[in-house]
Amino acid sequence: MPFQRQWKKRFSAALAHPPLVCENGFGYTKNMKLTLQLQLLPTADQKADLLTTMARFNEAATFAAKVGFDAGIFGQVTLHRLAYYAIREKFGLSSQMAVRAISKAVECFQRDKTKCPVFKPRSAVCYDQRVLSFKGLTEVSLWAMTGRLRIPFVCGAYQRERQSRIKGQADLVYRGGKFFLLCTIDLPEEAPITPVGVLGVDLGIVNIATTSDGETFAGGAVDAIRRKHNLQRKRLQRRGTKGAKKKLKRVSAKESAFRRHQNHRIAKSIVQAAQRTSRAIAVEELTGIRQRVNTSVDAWSGPSGFPPLRPVRIA
């Protein structure tokens, strides 16, 4: 009983307002978009063509952003009138790729109009149905500077089952020496669920998450991995050699993957528990916690290094 009273007090605001409060946060939504990751397997020549295409595309997007920023124009249509023909002539992109380069600049301006974005040579390339098509279940056709490239790809069983739902824009990314195609899929709409009650979630350091049902997700194993990587990172930073910097990147990527996996595992378990009982999810408010709690600087490498729980889709 004391445990239940404690949770009722902490999440009294969420309990007093049933369904509508959580519908825009961790509640259940009518529409859901997911991203499928497909790994491309290009030949050596195709890889060189793709890297050249990425560099040229991002140069064009940077050019479009500069033209729009200098002119104070941030809309798709108006920026298209200013930069389209110059991009076609200067960078040799096709009509649709020029449009996509302009669109990439416009998307950045939608977030912040006070800075002119500069895109890295190996930043993502945006494709749509006019410049990308799937040839069966194992090949994709992409536009490149040298023409269309038919490239085989591999994916897991989860992605293969949902491949027929791919629609709209897809991003070509280059990560760790490999090419990936990030495709958006739309899942069919589900009947809206009216939550009956609220499942409270308390976030912490010793225990990553504790629900109002008493279920605890301990952080001991996670904290051990975090401290191991933290010590390894300090040693490599002190060394400062070229090899140490490369190792540092690999350690960082490994730790990020571990965090994402743990984050998803815990969030998925919480969402499943809420779905079984038709409840919404209320997460503890952590705004200003650094000012409210006095602790050592080293202790903050835990909560700041581990991303907050995010809503997940249970397929």
Image (cartoon, rainbow, N blue to C red):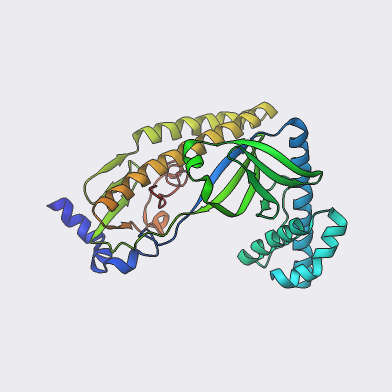
Residue 61 at x, y = what percent? 75, 57
Q: Residue furthest right?
A: 89
Quarter residue 46 falls in: top right
Front-most of 172 and 204?
Answer: 172
In this picture, residue 22 sits left or right of residue 89: left
Front-most of 202 and 122?
Answer: 122
Residue 158 at x, y = what percent? 46, 40
In this picture, residue 94 sits left or right of residue 27: right
Q: Residue at 35% x, 38% y: name it.
A: 219
Q: Residue at 87% x, 56% y: name it.
A: 90
- Report the number of discs: 0
Residue 303 at x, y = what percent? 42, 46
Q: Residue furthest left?
A: 1
In this picture, residue 185 sits left or right of residue 247: left
Q: Residue at 80% x, 54% y: name it.
A: 93
Front-most of 222 and 257?
Answer: 257
Q: Residue furthest front?
A: 136
Using the rendered image of the protein, determine whether residue 305 is visible from the camera's viewpoint.
yes
Residue 176 at x, y = what percent? 64, 35
Using the rendered image of the protein, determine whether residue 73 is visible from the camera's viewpoint.
no
